[in-house]
Amino acid sequence: MSIAEWVVNNAIKGGTRIICRVHDAELEKIPQHGPLIIVANHVNSLDVPLMITHLLPRPLIGLAKIETWDNPVFNLLFTMWKAIPIRRGEADLLAFRQAKDVLEKGQILVIAPEGTRSNNGRLQQGKPGLAMLAAMSKAPIMPLAMFGGEKLGKNIRRLTRTDFYIRVGESYELTGDIDIRDKSVRQQITDEVMCKIADLLPEDYRGVYAGQQPKDKYIQKSHNL
């Protein structure tokens, strides 16, 4: 890490801790190295900078919508963080190959299967692309849930700090008997993982996964971490 990167990352980390009380003790559950797919919910623009800067110096790379690079500030930050741009709504094979390469190098990859911010903190249905990457890489999957950040704008106007919570679950891996070519199977895999994120959230945040308790047909607890 260069001096400039160290300064920027610590400035962001310090700034977020001024405006937020960051409850991040569970980040210690995340190993120092991969291969590992962290599967997280996506509330707002605070999620990624806060998580990346609080997990450093662990090697962490995320996927981000390609439009992120249209913003000059985010362009600089996400380029510095070596984020992988992805085209939403299509099969982005280049992004897939780059993500698989990250895992093959033993690094940690972060995915937000919802594909877009919820802004209210309630879970939206995850997209099935996660399943293909997990099947091809055979990397363990670790669910991570964030909540509280949706209150940031309101609390800033009130000159009040925001409680930002991070919860980390157990690691999982895919079971052996899977026809990954079947889109319905890929969707069910993603939904099973998203339900693990829902289990880490307060009930009001579970959104489309509220009340769902599916049998883990395609995922099982991992013994690799």
Image (tube, rainbow, N blue to C red):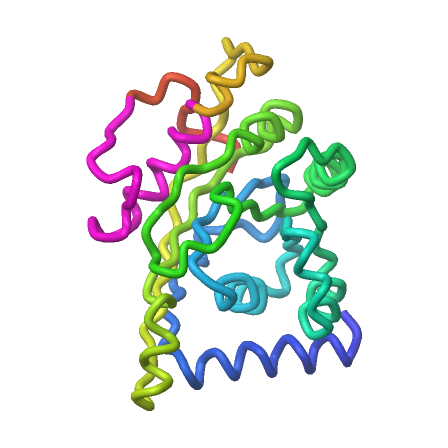
Near-viewer residue (179 or 60): 179
Q: Give the image location of residue 143, x and y in percent.
A: 43, 43
Q: Is residue 121 found left or right of 129 in the rendered image?
A: left
Answer left or right for 67 relative to 152.
Answer: right
Q: Which residues are magenta?
A: 188-214
Q: Nearer the viewer, residue 156 or 79?
A: 156
Residue 211 is situated, as x and y percent measured from the top left of the image, at 20, 35
Residue sitting nearer the eye, 184 or 67: 67
Q: Residue at x 75, y 63 (%)?
A: 79
Q: Nearer the viewer, residue 58 or 53?
A: 53
Could you tell me residue 130's position as x and y percent? 55, 33
Whether residue 205 appears in magenta in the rendering, the answer is yes
Q: Residue 129: within the magenta?
A: no
Q: Is residue 12 left or right of residue 199?
A: right
* Residue 23, quarter of the rendered image: bottom left
- Specify the quadrant of the image occupied by residue 74: bottom right
Q: Is residue 168 above or below residue 54?
A: above
Number of labelled discs?
0
Residue in the image at 52% along x and 12% along y: 178
Quick one: which residue is furthest to the bottom in this view?
159
* Location of residue 126 with respect to 150 vertically, above or below: above
Of helix, strand and loop, which mostly describes the magenta segment? helix
